[in-house]
Amino acid sequence: MIWIAITLGILLLIFGRFSAGGPFGLSVDILGLLSGIYLLIKGADYLVDGAVAIAERMGVSKLFIGLSLVAFGTSAPELAVSITAAVKGHGGIAISNVVGSNIANILLCLGLTALSVRLSVGESTLKMEMPFLLIISASFVFMLLRTTPPSISWNDGAVLFGFLMIFVYYLYRMAQSDMKLMEKEKSINIYKAFLMTGVGLFGVSVGGDITVRSVIGISENLGASESLFALTIVAVGTSLPEMVTSLAAAKKGHHDMSVGNIVGSNLMNILVIMGISSIVGRKLVVDVPMYYVDVSFMLGSVILLWVMSLKRSLGKLQGAIFLSVYVPFILFVIGRR
């Protein structure tokens, strides 16, 4: 069934923008929406199962896989959007995509996941990865706000790549430590595991793209506000892979992968996506009033996640707090435009 959905998804992407207007266009958008949601759900299942199998076969932790392979894979939509925007000279879109996605990843994705499943937070995540994310986020905010209007240049991207090398080295040492402590599951077919992971990554990436385009098309057909879906749906849409993957991992009991996916994805968004986008675009500028509020929400969401995780778990209360903080942010950005 997933192959049918993938084929349909490819056809919808090839033919470009879904909506042609009128009842037919609306019908195509609804079909695309259903196909996109199915791809997201099934792709997340394949991705989680494949990633867990790779972790067991290689003798590394699920946290390592969540921080690296899964995090990078689910950041593919943000990567595509930001680099395309940077190349076409839309620096504000490239930057806001990362800022908005990082906020949504924590406040919306983890909020909904924590409401559904109580998440345990590993000691390494609490003491190492979250503080590192806080340092990276604070550095990114400083880079943006040191100029008026906020901007990030190619040399800032070089600095971000330097931080990326530190993170890659940290992951390398983590993998080495995992391999010494964990036993490898020889019975698992590594090729099948990589195939499942690849299909899952493709499913969540294409499914997220199809879902976003379809919702925009439906909004246009129904006469919804353009600013509404531009400021909310597109930003949230690029976070859909992280959302469904973290929720799927949590429901399967892989909490380290669930939390690691969000933390790792936020790191990838800043270090990889912003690093590449700023180098490609040379200088990216955000011409938006009161943009310090947006980046403050991004930095504040990291701090809130760290504080909420001090008891080594995230439950319904924490999930509700995350969502209650996200709502005012969305209302602010809509009211500002």
Image (tube, grey):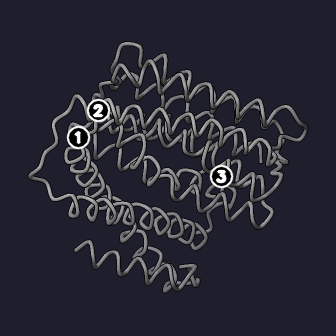
Q: Is residue 6 left or right of residue 90?
A: left
Q: Residue at x 62, y 41 (%)?
A: 330
When asked about the image quadrant of residue 37, the answer is bottom left
Q: Nearer the viewer, mark 3 or mark 2?
A: 2
First of labels 3, 1 by sequence position: 1
Q: Which residue is mark 3?
A: 231
Q: Residue at x 50, y 66 (%)?
A: 209
Q: Which residue is mark 1?
A: 59
Most foreground residue, 314 or 329:
314
Q: Which mark is residue 178?
A: 2
Most foreground residue, 296 or 163:
163
Whether tag 3 and tag 1 are in contact, CB under 8 A, the answer is: no
Q: Is residue 145 left or right of residue 49?
A: right
Q: Amino acid at mark 2?
A: Asp
Q: Residue furthest top?
A: 311
Q: Secondary structure at mark 2?
A: helix
Instruction: Calculate the distance from the C-alpha at mark 3 to the C-alpha at mark 1.
Output: 42 Å
Q: Is residue 140 above or below residue 57?
A: above
